[in-house]
Every structure is written in C-alpha cells, then in structure tokens.
Image (cartoon, helix red, strand yellow):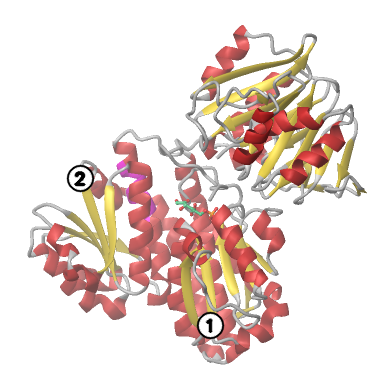
Amino acid sequence: MCRIVGYIGYNQATPILLNGLGRLEYRGYDSAGVAVFGDKGIVKARSEGKLVNLKKKTESTDVSGTVGIGHTRWATHGEPNETNCHPHSSMNGKFVVVHNGIIENYDVIKKQLLKNGVKFLSETDTEVVPQLLEYYYDGDVLEAIRKVTNELTGSYALGILCADCPDIIFAARKSSPLIVAKGENENFIASDISAILDYTKTYTTLNDGDIVELKKDSVKLFDKDLNEKEINFTVTDLDLSAVMKNGYEHFMLKEINEQPEKVKGLFDSYVSDGKVDIPELEKLSDCLENCEKIYAVACGSAYHTSIAGKYVIEQFSRIGVETDIASEFRYRSPILNEKTPVIIISQSGETADSIAALRMAKEHSAPVIGIVNVVGSTIYRESDCVLYTKAGPEIAVATTKGYATQLMMFYLIALYLAQKKGTLTAQEIAQYCAELETIPEKAERLVKNTAQIEKYSDRYKSSKNFFFIGRNTDYAAAMEASLKVKEISYISSDAYASGELKHGTIALIDKGTPVISFCANKRLFDKAWSNAEEVVARGAEVICVVSQKDEEKIKEGYGKIVLEDICDEFSTMLEVIAMQIFAYYIAKGNGCDIDKPKNLAKSVTVE
Ligand code: F6R
C-alpha cells in the first residue's frame, strides 16, 4: 500500500526521505517519488519500480533542499508508471501532494475541474487533490485545505507542499494512517513510526479530520474547521533493532523466531496463579457474560485466528462464535445490537475492510473488542476495548508473530470467559493455563530445530499444488498453512476440512499430490487418520503433522512432522508455526522474494 514520509529541518531532505521510504519498503509498492523544496522551487524525482531506481533519479536531478515529501505507491488508479507516480502537482505547480488512500469521488471532482479548464496529467484519483487546492487557493493554504478536505470522500493521508510556503509542510488525514513526529529542530510526517526511528521516537497519531502545519521548529494541529488543538506527543518504546533483520536472512525468519518470546509476553501479562485476568475486558464483562453470541471479524490470517478461537471459545465458555471475513460482513445484514459483542482482529489496525466492519458494528450499538498490534492505529482507537498483542513491528508481509499473538489472545479470552461464566472449574482453568505456559518453550524448540520440516520443504518445493486437511482446531491450522504457502511461494494450495474432501475435491488428488494432514488434535486422530488413508489410496503423498503421543500410529511410508504434545485445544499454535517454517523453506528453495511477495502489501488500507 502507499506510504508517506515528510521531512522539514536543517538537513538535506532527500537522503532522509529515501531512508524513511526504505524502512517502509516491506509494505509493498510499485513506484516511488520525492518532491523537495530547493532554490529553484519544488523539484520532483519519480520512478517506476523499486527505490534503487528512485535513488538513481535523485542522483541525476537536483533535489537538494531541507524540506520535502516522499511516497511509495501501490497502484490502484492507473498503471504503476512514472506519470501516475506521486508526488502529484497542480496545473500551475502551486501545490504538490503525496497521498495514501482512495478519493472515492475523484471522478466527479475531476469532471468539474476539467469543465473549468484544469488540465490533468495522470490517471490517478490523487491528482484531484493538488488541482482542487490550487482551484480554491486565494493566499491562505490552510483554508484551501479545509475546503478541499470537506469535499473529498474516501480515505486520505496527505502530505502537501505549497510553492508560496518554502518553510512549511502541510498534512491532513482521514481513515488512512499518518503520524507527526518531533525531533531537535526538525519535524516529520510518516505513515508509521518505523519510517523515522533513525531520527526520533517522539510522535503523535493524527485523528480523522486533523490538519497539520509543520515547520522545522513548530507543529500546529487543527481540527477540520481549523480550530487549533492541543498536541499530545508520546514516545515509542520501539527501537531500531525492531525494524532490522538482526542477522537473520529474512524478516519472516526473524519474526518466526520471535514468536516464543512474544506469546510468553502475553501469557505473563494476563495469567497469574492459574487464573486469567484481562482488565481491558472488565467494562464489557456484563455483556460478555450474558451474551449468546460473539462475532469475530477479520481478513486473511487474522480471520484464520478467529476460526481457531471459535472452537476454543465455544468449547470453554459455551458462547457461540460466528466468524466472518470483514469484506463479507460489511455487505451482509448481521444481527447486531448491544448484546452482540464483535471482536475485530487486525495486526496493523488499519485494514480497510476490518475498519468498516468495526464502524458498522458500532452503528448498531454492538460493543467492539479490538485485537490489535499497532498502538494508535484506527482499530486501536475506535474499539471500545483494546487487547494489544505486543508482537512488535511485523515487517515481513506474511504474518507470523502477528498470527501467534492473536491466537494466544483468543486462548486467553476463551479461558477468561469460561472463568467468568463458570463453565470450567477453577482446577480446569489452572490446568489449561499450565498447558498454555508450555507453549513458548515448545515453540522455541520447534523454531530452533527445523530439520524435520526443511526436509519436506525441499522434497516438495517443485509441487504444483498442495492440499492441507484437518478437523476442528486442526482445520483452522490447515487454512493458515495453505495461505502461507500460497502467498510466499506462489504455489497453489487448498485447505479442506478433512471430512469434506470426499464431497468433490478428492477428484483433484493424483499420484504424487502432496497432502499435509493435521492430526495433532489427539481426540480426532483416528478420524483424521482415515481421511489421510483415503487420499493415499488415490495416490497422494501424505505428511502427517502429529503429536509425539500419536507418532507411533503413523504407518511406514507416510511423511511426518512431529510436534511436542500439547492439549488438543491449543495444538493449532504449534501446527501453524511448523507450517510457517515449511512455507518459508519452500519459498527460499524457490528463490522467492520472501519478505515482499509479489502483488501483496503489508496493510491493506483500501477496500
Ligand atoms: C497473511 C497476512 C494477511 C493479513 C490480512 C489482515 O500472511 O498477513 O492475510 O492477515 O491482510 O491484516 P491485518 O491483520 O493487519 O488486519
């Protein structure tokens, strides 16, 4: 998705902008550009493709100056070519703009401006912003921004330069992330703090409707009607190492390895003496205790954690859980009211469909619990209760530690609800807590001893199609495993509930088709096993993901990945970590761009 950085200070802007864009590179983009205020006014350098191309451009263009804005673009309106690349300028060059988001009414505005003789160069929705600014501008930039932002529908984070104000960057935000950060005699805007951790840790997140006037030694914040607002800066506890590889070959591998520590952190925050205490949920405790149904809504992997969560919450607390893909939820008519809590799960907290689902839930008075990894993100700010997953910045596009911490949060919620409702005894809760406590050490041994998994990645890396099958919590694992393989190694794969395969899909099983059968749920081992035999009978090569306890039951000739024993309810965690490793080594074996898979972006801020 598009990302923004802006700098104003005493240093040269271009290297800082390039460095900041580089820190955000993992989020996916297809072209990049900067605009810098120099002696000759505002000069732009833009290029298709990766930042190295832009860097070359900046070496042959005079982009010197201490005030500038930069952008990486993930094409939505118009091809990823140089003309469509940001920054965009108004017809007479008065305004230059970078934008993240989508201007939904751009067509209407564009038609109106064209009638008034305005000439457009690009196919983008963004270009209407500088053009409209120039159209309304009568010497007062803030007033022009007020008028323009009042007219725009959709989402935007904007960085704006005006040719008449060489010592100011303007910014505005609605529904797309944007922060303002403060340094010593220098200030920044950025899509997120990781872009500028090299320079400062002091920042504030803008709210919808906020407009900013940034000088090198001052920051002014206004609401949408230009009333000045107080600014509350905070200091992030992230340091640069959180956004660096620290010796790992890929961020994904680093993040896989961070999982034991991250899930332990969550466990330690909420469990003591065999009891689960989640103070953040207390204000909804009446509603949670008395509700008959909870919705869990998310996209992609975050949606998969909700499926694993559903099995466990229903079993432990006897509250029904309805899981929904956010982009579907928002366009159906779910029965929502003040008695139906909605859990929105999102690593980034900025996924457009998940935000829309959250807002829809709130419109119907449903209490919203956000499971979120980014403090200050939209879902973090708009949820009634926030459960912060504390995974630290996730850089690889494919989620790993984001998933594991969301899953841990679901386990904790399930136990918390069971404790509140009395559906498990204190002794049972304590036993489950004891099991949960073993996850970090088991996960640690799993991520450190990958040979048994790598062997299969290597053997099957040239396969054309994988099947992942499982039942119950093992099915939740199958869904996430399938997505991991697809997204980072571009190999087609399907996840099926084991019992469902024979209702059609089994027709696709041929000699040599790799089928990964999840059997770590011991209660359902025999059922899972007979489904594995069914596919073997049709020529498939099966790898069973099995717990130590059942290892002996796997017949000669079947592949197996053996996991340490854990209670059935929590087996998904180890299964998925094993499959992250499996997918990672397949992608590595195939020379794929593991951290930045093609066509994908880290946070999907458009619908
Ligand atoms: C897959 C992956 C995506 C995200 C999805 C939701 O590895 O990372 O499927 O899980 O885009 O993103 P968040 O959690 O940021 O809302």
The amino acid type, in three-letter code, at marker 2 is: Ser
Residue 425 in the figure: left or right of residue 159 = left
Residue 380 at least partly seen: yes
Q: Residue at x 54, y 20 (%)?
A: 47
Magenta region, mostly helix, strand or loop?
helix
Q: Is residue 449 visible from the viewing direction of this image?
A: no
Mark 1 Cβ and ligand 1 under 8 Å apart: no
Residue 568 percent coordinates (x, y)? 37, 76
Say whether residue 272 is left or right of residue 76: right
Choose between 83 and 483: the one closer to the eye: 83
Mark 2 sits near ligand 1, with its Cβ under 8 Å away: no
Magenta range is 578-586
Give the image quarter of residue 506. Answer: bottom left
Task: State the separation of the CA atoms marked 2 and 1.
Answer: 42 Å
Tag on residue 293? Answer: 1
Seen in the picture, residue 82 relative to 549 is either above or below; the reply is: above
Foreground residue among 521 and 95: 95
Q: Is residue 370 left or right of residue 317?
A: right
Q: Which residue is situated farthest in the front direction here?
A: 115
Query: Local crowd at mark 2 within 10 Å, few (<14), some, or many (≥20)?
Result: some
Q: The residue tagged with tag 1: helix, strand or loop?
A: strand
